[in-house]
Image (cartoon, helix red, strand yellow):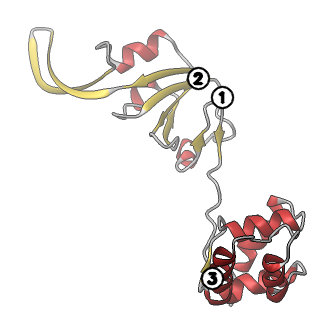
Amino acid sequence: MKNFGIFTASQEEITVNGETYKDIIFLRNAKGDDLVSVLKSNPHPFYIAVDETGKVCSMQRDPEQIQIPNHEIIGIDQDFGYGDECSIYGALFDGVEIVAPPVPFPELSARQFWHAVLVIGIRQDEVETSISTPNDPLYIEDEAERLAVLIDIRNATLFRRDDWLVDGLTQAHNIPKEHMDTLWIWSGHIE
């Protein structure tokens, strides 16, 4: 694997066999080297173009087909199971391999959330009691903060997977993160 860096587009004029061509687009790195020459001097079985978030925008075998400006161009030695180059869109490059993007978690209505929690044996009134009970893992010592959280629990219309309450319930009840993730996705389908 080799990260070739970011290449930017520039319009240039070239002369081939005495004929001049204007406004030809070249991708060049900070040193001024053109992309295709750099890639051909250090060949890899595959090349990927990765944006600043790590999303893979393209994967190609041919270095001349990976010309995407303002993206990191990385030579990789395998396709990580994405043999069809069209199937790569949306995948992520984590610096070592290409991985599937994380599953987006839907926001749950209060009704969906409390039904989901009930499925794993936790009731809303138990959560409220835990927040108000010293030595409980969910206990909130500061009274003003505790009252504010109780208002949120009783009146929230939406819950997000990354809410502190969800993480607290997961930890307090020793629920594996993967199980909570699965439950969350399932709960998003409750009508």
Kind of residue at badge 1: Gln
- CA–CA distance in space, label 1 to label 2: 7 Å
| Relative to 50, 25 lies left or right | left
The amino acid sitting under disc 3 is Asp
Mark 1 lies on a secondary structure that is loop
Contact between marks 1 and 2 (CB within 8 A): the answer is yes
Whether residue 10 appears in this view of the structure is: yes
Can you tell which mark lies on residue 152?
3
In the displayed structure, would residue 65 be above or below residue 91? above
- How far from the left and from the top, in percent, is residue 78? 66, 28
> Sequence-wise, which precedes: disc 1 or disc 2?
2
Which quadrant of the figure has residue 162?
A: bottom right
Q: Given this view, does label 2 or label 3 mark the residue nearer the observer?
A: 3
Please tell me which residue is depicted at 58% across the width and 43% down the height of the picture: 92
Q: CA distance from mark 1 to mark 3?
A: 49 Å
Say if residue 190 shows up in the picture. Answer: no
Residue pointed to by mark 1: 78
**Residue annotated with mark 2:** 45
Note whether 8 is above or below 29 in the view shown.
below
**Residue 21 tag number:** none
Q: Residues within 10 Å of mark 3 (few under 14, many from 20)?
A: few
